[in-house]
Amino acid sequence: MQEIASEKPLVTVLMPCLNEAETLGTCITKAKNYFLRHDIDGEVLIADNGSTDGSQEIAIRLGARIVHIQEKGYGNALRGGIANAEGRYIIIGDADDSYDFSDLTLFINKLLEGYELVMGNRFKGGIKKGAMPPLHRYLGNPVLTWIGRLFFPNPCGDFHCGLRGFRKDAIESLNLRTTGMEFASEMVVKASLYKMQIAEVPTILYPDGRNRSPHLRSWRDGWRHLRFLLLFSPRWLFLYPGMILMMAGLLTAIILLSGTKVHSLIYSTTAIVIGFQTVVFSIFTKAFAMAEGLIPDDYRLKKLLHFLNLEKGLICGIFLIFMGFMGSIYALKMWESNSFGSLNPSQTMRIVIPSVTCLALGFQVIFSSFFLSILALKRG
């Protein structure tokens, strides 16, 4: 390992802290001793989130630097710490002594090789007895990691490992925004979307050194992670379910129109309408996220939106409304020819329901086209 000459530290070890007096001193000492042993110009930075148990005094006494973060939350603490870190590379880890700050070589070597994000993997490195609750080890972490890799392909086998390293300028360019525990997922997701160089190294997880319960709340924070993954993936949240619903509704409608029983046609055409709106939601979401800089530009979507412009949307919508209107008039004429008396549902339903569906889809297309045009104003 060769140190890169710089006026500022090469590495910042960043620890978020909220009342960690029991273990903070141990973590700081391990990190500083590691720097001394390997002759690395490094600093230990404590992002204090309002500790009242003497954690701040411990950090100062051991020579760590403190940045005070007023806004509560894991994400807020880390974002504030990253902004104030002086090192070219940052290694973050919890201050509960569950990670060994005395051995950071694997992380630093990968960073020096050019990787922009280096994730720890506790499942490869080893989880000591009592270090991770069974719910997290066998359900929470594996399931959320599997979903994360499905939605956002990347090499990370442990999305929520608290020990990770990264190049400061690379992570700052991602404009991370979440304030809570889902910050861990946001970092991996955005790094994947922006095609950053990501590596992972085995990491050992030790039992929490504190006597009190951790800040993490299993179900609440697990839901926040899952919610974030869904919101950042319009394809899986809207597009794929909408397409499946549309295709299922369309195929069912074709079958019912050729049969004798058509009452269920209402449900199949409703599925088409809901599916279409869901697909449109996926386009809205992605277009908005691109306009706000939340995700990188998708040139395929931009090309599609350039082709499917407002004028073409209006033409398509007007055509669908016209078809629905003509079908409705035809059904009305049928009723009139029967002196506005009773009609055979198997005949009229085949006309009325598709006509109403065309009317609904036509108006959806028109208003959706206007809304997409409004979103496009910001992109110029």
Image: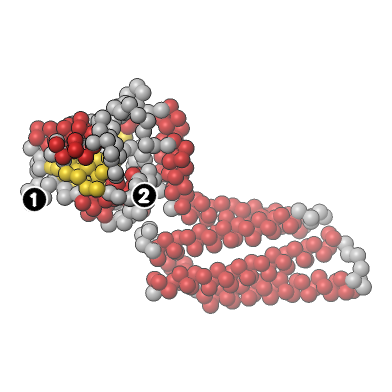
How did the renderer colour the structure? secondary structure
Q: Secondary structure at mark 1?
A: loop
Closer-to-camera residue (368/102): 102
> What is the quadrant of residue 355 in the picture?
bottom right
Identity of the residue furthest to the top in this view = 129
Q: Amino acid at mark 1?
A: Ser
Instruction: Tell whether 108 sits left or right of 378.
Output: left
Q: Which mark is residue 6?
A: 1
Q: Which mark is residue 289?
A: none
> What is the quadrant of residue 14 in the picture?
top left
> What is the quadrant of residue 349 in the picture?
bottom right
Q: Residue at x 33, y 53 (%)?
A: 176
Chain-order first, disc 2 or disc 1: 1
x, y percentage for residue 168?
22, 51
Closer-to-camera residue (240/169): 169
Closer to viewer: mark 2 or mark 1: 2
Does any portion of residue 150 appear in the rendered image?
A: no
In this view, 128 is above or below 177: above
x, y percentage for residue 224?
44, 45
Give the quarter of the figure containing the C terminus: bottom left
x, y percentage for residue 118?
26, 42
Label 2 belongs to which residue?
Answer: 179
In this view, 306 is above or below 18: below
In this view, 45 is above or below 33: below
Does any portion of residue 344 appear in the rendered image?
A: yes
Q: Residue at x 36, y 49 (%)?
A: 179
Q: Residue at x 29, y 44 (%)?
A: 49
Q: Amino acid at mark 2?
A: Thr
Closer-to-camera residue (158/24): 24
